[in-house]
Amino acid sequence: MQSKSIVQAALAASLLVIGCGANAQQYIVGSADMDHDGISNRHDRDRDGDGIANARDHHPNRFDRVARTGPRGDLDRDGVQNRYDRDRDGDGLVNARDPHPDRFDRRIARKGPRGDLDRDGIQNRYDKDRDGDGIANRRDPHPNRKDVAEVGRTGPRNDLDGDGIRNRNDHDRDGDGIRNRRDDHPNDRHRG
């Protein structure tokens, strides 16, 4: 008779695990330690460890996303708690200037100091030509935009006329048959 009750208890526990899936632990309260902080659930003021006290937590047995965005969380997982992190979402724009400080923005991340705008393998903070248009940042009126005024094609490292010779070595950059030093418009083949 006793073995039948043990089997029933084991069956009930397995059904609980099957019904709850990966989140089965969140429904087991008592002496268990849901957030693995060393305090049993019955004595833990924040059972799920999401940074919200059970009394104020709408889901005290479920770790909520708010934990990642809360002051004690680490949204960008850089090891710095949000309350001390100047860039919580890790997109390269400080919280004070970020319109969405809790949401990672891929475009901002590419333009930020830790990103790589031109995808050349050099982080923006070390790249002397962030947008990869052939003009150094300090001389480029738009250092984060490659497509301004065809700068990318007319820059020294590119090939305006597509002849396989870089502009800085090409004596006729626009390929109109007139050498650069005699051409009034060396970057425009339609105006010689």
Image (cartoon, helix red, strand yellow):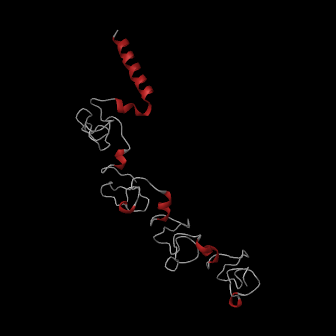
Q: Residue furthest front?
A: 191
* Residue lying at 51% horizontally and 80% vertically, measured from the top left: 139
Image-quadrant location for residue 93: bottom left
Name the side, left or right, on which 157 lies relative to 98.
right
51 or 11: nearer the eye?
51
If the image is split into quadrants, where does the C terminus sit? bottom right
Left or right position of 46 against 181: left
Among all residues in the image, which is located at the extreme right?
A: 177
Q: Quadrant of the N terminus?
A: top left
> Residue 12 appears at what percent x and percent y?
39, 20
Which residue sits at x=30%, y=55%? 83
- The relative height of residue 133 versus residue 171 in the rendered view (above or below) is above
**Based on the displayed image, in which of its 4 quarters is residue 96 positioned?**
bottom left
Q: Quadrant of residue 149?
A: bottom right
| Residue 184 on image: x %, y % | 68, 88
What residue do we see at 40% from left, 60% from top? 98
Q: Is residue 35 above or below residue 181?
A: above
Residue visible at 33% across and 56% down?
80
Residue 48: x %, y % from top left: 32, 38
Q: Is residue 65 above or below residue 170?
A: above
Vertical placement of residue 143 versus 90, above or below: below
For the residue pair 159 and 12, the one nearer the viewer reads as 159
User: How many numbered marks appear?
Assistant: 0
Horizontal side of 104 relative to 156 (left or right) equals left
Is 138 on the left or on the right of 188, as rendered? Answer: left
In the image, farthest residue toward the left = 43
Q: Residue furthest top?
A: 1
Closer to the camera, 124 or 66?
66
